Image (spheres, rainbow, N blue to C red):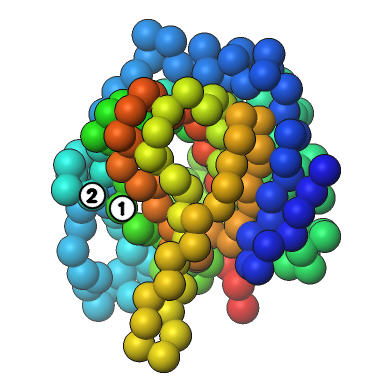
Amino acid sequence: MSLSVNEWYVFTDAIDNKTCNKLKRLGSKQWSAAAVDIKKGITDEERKKGREPEMGVDKKTRITDVAWTNDQWVYDIIWPFMVGANNEAGWEYEIKAAESSQITRYKKGGFYNFHRDGSGCHLSKYNNPTNAFMHDHVRKLSMTVLLNKSFEGGNFEFTSYGKENCEITPVEMNQGDVVVFPSWMEHRVAPITKGIRYSLVTWFVGPPFK
């Protein structure tokens, strides 16, 4: 079952509990503190050739443990949801590949402040000539799969701005739900107040928008 809401697309009851637990176990013994781009500003040279991020841990921005997977069976599961959302929502973005999938673990007090995954412009192009899947591509679509529900807090939320007001919209999610949205949309994971929240996050890439 799928549900189109505003500018994102939700598949409810999309992935069964057994598969969610299998995805969650991919993080076992591989956890590390999540890094974010801590670089401030952009140089004149970067405005011409693209911005180079500086990754580091910033506990004022994000407190999360992460692990990574490139297992093909994971992509076999999630790719059709991306294709379905891309078509049904009317985005029809040119998608060429997916980045490594990230398993996230938010313990009590964990969070990820409002942020954007990518801008879609040439300044955010990946510069990796040895990786044909990523080189000269940008993040266009983002996906979150909720892998459990035994926690409190931790809402997945979007924000929008209009008439000088900031509106925060939570997305109701249960275990196995899949949310797909354009990577430029501002979103967050609110602080966890009880339990542990697990999710699978993937970014889908293609040529910069023109």
Q: Is residue 138 above or below residue 148?
A: below
Q: Is residue 41 left or right of residue 188?
A: left
Locate residue 206, reporting x and y percent.
63, 57
Check disc 1 and report the residue beneath it.
113
Q: Earlier in the sequence, mark 1 or mark 2?
A: 2
Q: How far from the left and from the top, in percent, is residue 112?
A: 32, 46
Depth check: give the residue in front, 12 or 23: 12
Splitting the image into 4 quarters, where does residue 111 fall?
top left
Residue at point 33%, 28% (across, down): 194
Residue 37 percent coordinates (x, y): 27, 51
Q: Residues within 10 Å of mark 2 (few under 14, many from 20)?
A: some
Up/down of 56 relative to 125, above or below: above
Relative to 159, does residue 109 appear above or below in the rendering?
Answer: above
User: In the visual, does 28 lie left or right of 34?
Assistant: right
Q: Nearer the viewer, residue 98 or 193?
A: 193
**Can you tell which mark lies on residue 61?**
2
Q: Quadrant of the C terminus?
A: bottom right
Q: Are marks 1 and 2 in contact (CB under 8 Å)?
A: yes
Between residues 191 and 122, which one lies in front from this camera angle?
A: 191
Q: Is residue 37 visible?
A: yes
Q: Quadrant of residue 63?
A: top left
Q: How many marks?
A: 2
**Element under disc 2:** loop
